Amino acid sequence: MVMSAFATSVGALPVLFIRSISHRRMDSILAYTAGIMVAASTYGLIPASLKLTNLYVLCCGVLVGALLLNVLEYIIPHIDLDHERSDVKLPQEALMFVAAMTLHNIPEGLSVGASLASEVENLGLVVALSMGLQNAPEGFLVALFLLNQGVRKSLGVAMAFLTGAIECLASVFGFFMVHIALFLVPYGLAFAAGAMLFIVYKELIPETHGHGYERLATFSFLLGLLSMIGVVEWFR
């Protein structure tokens, strides 16, 4: 469960070695990551949630996850973390994105920990694998998105590390509080899926369109989707 959570931090490290990135490459990376996140949601989280509960709970969880992030977009103001240094300012889009990724990592971590501690056959493996496979490109995505918003590389990597650390703590809590957390697992899985799908459609897909590389982004999205499905099938 630690490896699953800290895959986010490992995925963010390559950003430190990137001097500049073209719109073409940026669009393809974002689209590929979006495909992974969609596959993790629809092929991993949602089926796992349905395995433990019913369609009503799933729909409520997905919609609550998306609605909560929608509300965050309106209430999170522009914040300057250090008024004396202009290179650490976080625009509203960047702050909202980090808050969204952090928020959806909490139920993800809770679900991983509780699933591993449960006696449901293969549930822990499927959930942990789904989370881990999308956490590495997700960490890269967080750092890259912040870099694109003008945030320093070191701060972007540090914030990606923070989102992974929070998921790790939630995993530990879920593992030791399995009798309480297991009840919340299907809700957490559905919530995480809704949050991820909201981020994909609201932030990532629009970000990959408008620079003239829409076709490349489309095929990158499909490759990301198929890659995630293929890896999950390989380990089953």
Image (cartoon, helix red, strand yellow):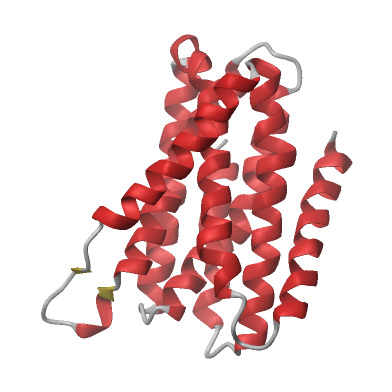
In the rendered structure, the answer to whether residue 51 lies left or right of residue 137 reads right
Q: Is residue 201 above or below residue 147?
A: above
Q: Position of residue 2 (x, y in %)?
A: 54, 40
Q: Is residue 64 above or below residue 8?
A: above
> Which residue: 44% across, 16% down?
177
* Residue that extends furthest to the left in the rendered view of this protein: 84
Decide if residue 124 is on the left or right side of residue 72.
Answer: right
Front residue of this view, candidates 108 and 8:
108
Residue in the foreground of this view, choosing between 138 and 213: 213
Quadrant of the image occupied by residue 207: bottom right
Left or right of 108? Residue 223 is right
Q: Residue at x 54, y 54 (%)?
A: 8
**Number of residue marks:** 0
Residue 138's spot in the image, x, y percent? 57, 58
Quadrant hosting residue 127: top right
Give the image location of residue 216, x and y in percent.
Answer: 76, 79
Residue 108 visible here? no
Task: From the viewer's perspective, tell me whether residue 127 is left or right of residue 57.
Answer: right
- Compared with residue 93, is residue 61 higher up or lower down, i.e. above or below? above
For the point 48% across and 19% down, the residue is: 184
Q: Quadrant of residue 235?
A: top right
Q: Is residue 83 above or below residue 170?
A: below
Q: Quadrant of the C terminus?
A: top right
Residue 65 placement (x, y as % from top left): 46, 39
Residue 130 shows in this picture:
yes
Residue found at x 75% / y 39%: 43
Point out the image quarter for the N terminus.
Answer: top right
Viewer-proximal residue among 168 and 150: 150
